[in-house]
Image (spheres, rainbow, N blue to C red):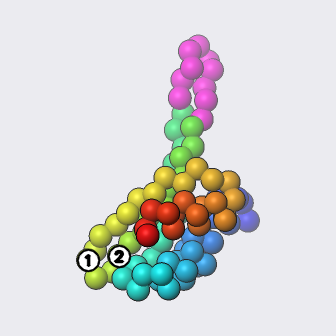
Amino acid sequence: MTESENKKSFVEKELTALLKKIDPDIERAEYEPCEWKVARGGSNISYITNEYVHVLYGPTGGQITINVTADSLAAITTDVIKKII
């Protein structure tokens, strides 16, 4: 399992379960990695990666998107909890 797949699985299962205990209106959390190619002049190309967790609320249909720049699962959890409480 790749790091991205591991984060996706963690967010969809464990983090979602935790968030539902904190706020019963939360339906689920989803992990989304986004990568862009950026030309740096000539043939130099860099890649920029941003990672997001989307927290979806069932009753209202609302959503919060959180930019998580952390490498560890604990840091992702901290970033998300800081935004929802």
Residue beneath the point at 54% across and 23% down: 39
- Looking at the image, can residue 5 be seen? no
Residue beneath the point at 63% across and 20% down: 44
Residue beneath the point at 43% across and 68% down: 84
40 vs 72: above or below: above
> Badge 1 local density, few (<14 within 10 Å), some, or many (20+)?
few
Q: Amino acid at mark 1?
A: Thr
In the rendered structure, are the residues bearing label 2 and label 1 in contact, judged by CB atoms less than 8 Å apart?
A: yes
Which residue is more in the foreground, 29 or 25? 25
Which residue is more in the foreground, 40 or 81? 81
* Quadrant of the frame with the N terminus: bottom right
Instruction: Report which residue position mark 2 lands on.
Output: 57
Say which quarter of the image contains residue 78.
bottom right
Residue beneath the point at 45% across and 62% down: 83
Stretch of the chain drawn in magenta: 38-47
> Is residue 46 on the magenta stretch?
yes
> Is residue 56 on the magenta stretch?
no
Is 46 left, or right, of 29 in this rendering? right
The secondary structure type at the circle numbered 1 is: loop
Is 56 left, or right, of 30 in this rendering? left
- Res 60 label: 1
